[in-house]
Amino acid sequence: MKIAVPKEIKNHEYRVALTPTGARELVSRGHSVTVQVGAGEGAGFSDADYEAAGAGIEANVDTLWRDAELILKVKEPQSEEVARLSRGQTLFTYLHLAAEEKLTRGLMESGATCIAYETVTDRQGGLPLLAPMSTVAGRMAVQAGAHSLEKAQGGSGVLLPGVPGVAPGKVAVIGGGVVGENAARMALGLGAEVTVLDKSIPRLEVLDDRYQGRMKTVFSTADAIDEAVRESDLIVGAVLIPGAAAPKLITRAMLADMKPGSVLVDVAIDQGGCFETSKPTTHAEPTYIVDGIVHYCVANMPGAVARTSTQALTNATMPFVIALADKGWKRALADNAHFLPGLNVQDGQVTYRAVAEAFGLESVDPASLVR
């Protein structure tokens, strides 16, 4: 199969969808891998590294896309990339379509087969291709939040770990999944006072046992969120409804109850954000202030630590990329019931129900397309 790896063009996105090691694996199986010139530089991989792995290097981006059967990316395709997609091609990347109607309709018009990393599942009900980036984003969330609390950044001037004689800052994490646990873990490591809110008692039990009560675990209710809003110096939004838009858990009116200079970090921004006042930002301008509250809403947080993120992503995606390359999308999805939910758009049809419902579109059962 002819596999293409374009250079990411989203603002300050330095990741690449495939490491040279991954390219070598595909080439060894008889596939053709072509990487756009400079695609790996942001993650520390040179064109020479890919050539040594057996991949080709292409300077002409139009040629790269036109000749590809399988296109591997990291972030959702930007408008100029959507225009290059065509029927018969397969795109495998993060899509997060429930918050992007224009992108959804653009992919439908392209006729391409579009498979999303973030809706592939596993036997335990997890999201194995989202998990590595969720781990990175969760750990970065507290790092970014701690920096945003600095007075020069518009924050309250609170040091999360405190110092002898001064109490530590308070961190609330809404959502106890992969992002939430990693954010809480980082905050604990800094010495902050940490509370995790979640609606799953079994999940809260796991966290309580794993961290031996060092973090507070609270069942998430409107009252609990109200208290977190009043008491916290930093709130991390780590809510995920797979493939669907995130619920708005903190409204603009609630910001008036927060301590001036407190920080909201919305890791759910790819899915529309879980704070009413959230809007996507970039690494170039990561924060903005609403009613005295600092918002950090970077939509590609792991892109800032591109080398670690690229290696973690390739480790997770390689078995699925190999299946697509060896078998083609239809058989690869038919053979793996956990890969099948990754299909979001195929030949003009939306195949993921939550995406269709978000925009009032009809949804087609993906299983009917792979029989």
Image (cartoon, helix red, strand yellow):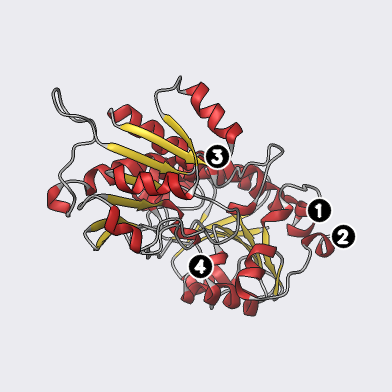
Tags 3 and 1 touching, CB below 8 Å: no
| Sequence-wise first label, 4 or 1 | 4
Task: Answer with mark 2 or mark 3, whichever residue precedes in sequence.
Answer: 3
Find the distance from the CA under tag 2 to the CA under tag 3: 29 Å
Q: Which mark is residue 73?
A: none
| Disc on res. 371 | 2
Q: Nearer the viewer, residue 261 or 287?
A: 261
Real-space CA distance between mark 3 and mark 1, rounded to the nearest whole angstrom: 22 Å
266 relative position to 103: left or right: left
Describe the element under mark 2 as helix, strand or loop: loop
What is the CA distance from the residue labelled 2 to the residue labelled 1? 7 Å
Q: Residues within 10 Å of mark 4 (few under 14, many from 20)?
A: many
Residue closest to the far front: 223
* Of residues 316 and 273, the one drawn nearer to the viewer in this rendering: 273
Q: Is residue 153 above or below residue 109?
A: above
| Residue identifier under label 3 | 315
Q: Report whether 101 appears left or right of 183.
A: right
The amino acid at mark 3 is Asn
- Between residues 28 and 111, which one lies in front from this camera angle? 111
